[in-house]
């Protein structure tokens, strides 16, 4: 489920700020984004978030800031196919492609998928 909170919008200016991030909450991937402007006459705030992989425009911002990690998919050293398919909602042809060429995940996605492979440690 996507959650949204929006107030007044302004034209982008030097006072506008935008942040996007991912984190893991109770073993599930969560994404958040926040945009705001502190200019006195055009102040606004916008928040958005949801579970699972973020929408492409949010993921692009996360990748630009944090880069990606290449993961092997399937096999004894790779992330389980079932976990990759469940996280990204891949079709079978997309899953075959990921198995053949690896997967470029954000650091948070990679951490969660690695955890899925090795299981919780405690």
Image (cartoon, helix red, strand yellow):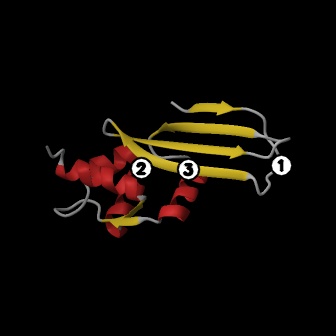
Residue on which the image places disc 3: 20
User: Could you tell me which secondary element the residue under label 2 belongs to?
Assistant: loop
- State whether residue 42 appears in this view: yes
Residue 11 versus residue 83: which sits nearer the camera? Answer: 11
The structure residue drawn at horizontal position 83% and vertical position 49%, both measured from the top left corner, is 11
Please determine whether, in this image, residue 71 is positioned above or below residue 91: below
Image-based side of 66 in relation to 6, left or right: left
Q: How many marks?
A: 3
The local crowd at label 3, few if under 14, some if 14 to 19, many if 20 or more residues have their Cα within 10 Å, is many
Residue on which the image places disc 1: 11
Upstream in sequence: badge 2 or badge 1: 1
Residue 74: numbered disc: none
The local crowd at label 1, few if under 14, some if 14 to 19, many if 20 or more residues have their Cα within 10 Å, is few
Residue 79 versus residue 13: which sits nearer the camera? Answer: 13
Please determine whether, in this image, residue 3 is positioned above or below residue 115: above
User: Could you tell me which secondary element the residue under label 1 belongs to?
Assistant: loop
- Marks 2 and 1, Cα distance to the nearest angstrom? 37 Å
- Marks 1 and 3, Cα distance to the nearest angstrom? 19 Å
The x and y percentages for residue 9 are 79, 40
- Marks 2 and 3, Cα distance to the nearest angstrom? 23 Å
Q: Are marks 2 and 1 in contact (CB under 8 Å)?
A: no
Residue 90: numbered disc: 2
- State whether residue 89 appears in this view: no
Mark 2 vs mark 3: in front: 3
């Amino acid at each position: 489920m996507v959650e949204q909170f929006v107030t007044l919008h302004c034209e982008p200016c030097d006072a506008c700020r935008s942040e996007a991030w991912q984190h893991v909450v109770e073993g599930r991937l969560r994404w958040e984004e926040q945009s705001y402007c502190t200019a006195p006459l055009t102040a606004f705030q916008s928040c958005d978030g949801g579970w699972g992989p973020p929408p492409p425009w949010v993921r692009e911002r996360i990748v630009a800031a944090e880069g990606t990690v290449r993961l092997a998919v399937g096999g004894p050293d790779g992330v389980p196919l079932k976990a990759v398919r469940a996280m990204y909602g891949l079709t079978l042809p997309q899953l075959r492609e990921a198995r053949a060429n690896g997967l470029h995940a954000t650091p948070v996605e990679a951490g969660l998928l690695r955890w899925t492979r090795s299981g919780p440690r405690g």
